[in-house]
Image: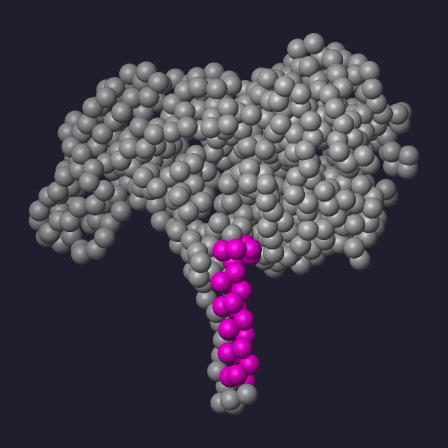
Amino acid sequence: MSASWWEELMLKHTRAHERQSAQKLGKDSIGHTFSERAAVLLVLLSFLFAAEAALAQANVLGQWQTLPSTMPINPVHVALLRTGKVLVVSGSGNVPSNTNYQAGIWDPATGTVTTQPLAWDMFCNGMVILSDGRPFVVGGTLAYDPFHGYAKSAAYDPSTGQFTDLESMAHGRWYPSATTLGDGTVMAFSGLSETGPTNTAVEIYTVGSGWSQEYPSGWTPPLYPRLHLLPNGNVFYSGPTNSSMMFDSTAHTWSYLTATNYSSGRTYGSSVLLPLTPANGYRPRVMIFGGGNPATATTEIMDLSAATPTWQWGPPMSQPRIEMNAVLLPTGKVLALGGSTNDEDAATASLNADLFDADGGSVSSAGQNAFPRLYHSVAILLQDGRVFVAGGNPTRGTYEPHMEVYSPAYLFAPDGSLAPRPTVTGVSSSAIGYGTTFQVQTPDATSITSAVLMRAGAVTHAFDMEQRLVGMSFTAGGGVLTVTAPPNGNIAPPGYYLLFLLNSAGVPSVGTFVQISPSAQPGDFSFSASPATQTVVASRSTTYTISVSPIAGFTGTVSMSVSGLPAGSTATFNPQAVSGAGSSTLTVNTGVLTPLGNYPLTITGVMSI
């Protein structure tokens, strides 16, 4: 049985807007041959029946797929780029003698990995994504055994495919955490210094001006602390120790908050900031999973909006997990996978994936992955709503090269076929200001029940330093949603997000990248055509009404053009351009020799201010 891939006709624009019908193509096929021998035919039928039974479970458990290609470098760190590709950073790959430092790009469209050399060892760094879409690397490995950390930092530019060194920190960091703050600056905390001891100071990076002074913490954090930016601008520390702490981002001081119910440490467990939505008042809740050696299967949830926040037990995982991953999905549910009961022990690996509904307080099965995912394994949400899973490095010198992709149950219909997905055919602005309204063109407007932003992830060592779901309110019109952007950067730090639309069946669209900006952009416009289809005979003409609607005070002029006309036909706009709000009539004239057929027309509006 061959795997299905979504093919989307997506529109990309900067200050131009296109309208065309979007298609999504999915196909399932089962290949088989018939022999003259009945025994062979019976075996094939048995296989087909088993395959159909597995398909029928896809809408309940989802579907796991092992990719045909393998990972050529140890995938210690991954980040989702604004291109939809995945940056992989290995560095020395946990091999002390290796000086061939490597990174790579995994392309979901082709399944291939292209590697490239690194100038220095970025193994065991902290990584987030800057507001301009560049992954930002903080620290790395200066020396092995004992480990010492680099004070270096660097950024990867998806446009050029190159890393550029940026300003260095005051001291080194090996195993640090990085956190994007509400103004787009980046907080670095913990990690081993260039001389070996833990770096206990906080530093804050500003693009263009470099690092701040050091802010003493007054305590010694663990390596790779689990940190989350809250809607009030403060940063919450959820583990892996059992003491929960709060960083005041204005005073640059730490304070003790409370302790977890699980009295032992949650080493290499995971932590997730649950969805922030207008419906819940952007109430911050954090869920922690597993960890410890031997590991625990327990989870806990804290509501940080409570007068006295405390940890409450959540539903347990199906198996204990250390070195696990937890991935936030567009539905708001959390996929927990990988890890093992005993650290770096494939014999006690957890191959059962779990799906958590924190709002409902429930957990269900998400099927089984094929390979143990232990130390240095990663899992990250992709643009199409699937989850990429790779790595596992329990022993130096070897790692798990097989890559897997998990397709959640929301992608399947009850019969196991691909579920119809909402489509996004355009967004009124590629850069969106806080608190502004913008428009999303979709033929499925009346069936949409949720519009969410998912921040592009950056994962290492059982923790995603970036993943974040922010819900948005909207109103639906004919073929369009008018959406209200998040109110500020503490709720949605500036940068690139995947916009997902979910329908009443809980099926998400393919994600569309948008940039959330700290300031409103110049006015923009929305574009629509009516009717969506027309029928015309040879030597006759037909018309469409092209409407332009201003957004955020747009007063510019929109000039129009059309492409995709069949041979022997012409088109005119009256008027050719519209200023502010207005409409134009598109007339399409066919000729005697215009061939029969269906022709998708692309109408483009380009604005000048």
Q: Residue drawn at (47%, 16%), measured in percent from left and top?
A: 519
Q: Give the percent coordinates (x, y) of residue 326.
A: 65, 41
Q: Position of residue 402 (x, y in %)?
A: 68, 55
User: How many labels were placed on the picture?
Assistant: 0
Q: Residue furthest right?
A: 146
Q: Quadrant of residue 444?
A: top left
In the image, farthest residue toward the bottom: 37
Look at the image and tell me whether residue 103 can be seen: no
Residue 59 magenta: yes
Magenta-colored segment: predominant secondary structure: helix
The residue closer to the viewer here, 62 or 216, is 62
Residue 288: quarter of image: top right
Relative to residue 446, is residue 60 drawn left or right?
right
In depth, the one of 243 and 375 nearer the eye is 243
Asked if 147 appears above or below 394 in the picture, the reply is above
Q: In the rendered image of this protein, does residue 452 appear above or below residue 577?
A: below
Magenta highlight range: 40-63
* Image spot of residue 148 (x, y percent): 86, 30
- Residue 308 appears in the rendering: yes
Taking the spot 48% from the left edge, 82% from the top edge, the residue there is 34
Residue 588 within the magenta-colored segment of the rendering: no
Question: Is 453 situated above or below 245?
Answer: below
Display coloring:
one colour
Q: Residue at x 33, y 38 (%)?
A: 445
The residue under the point 54% across, 52% down is 407
Report the residue that reaches farthest toward the left.
Answer: 539
On the picture, is 459 further left or further right than 60? right
Q: Is 116 left or right of 443, judged from the image as shown?
A: right
Q: Position of residue 564 (x, y in %)?
A: 26, 45
Left or right, 46 with reference to 577: right
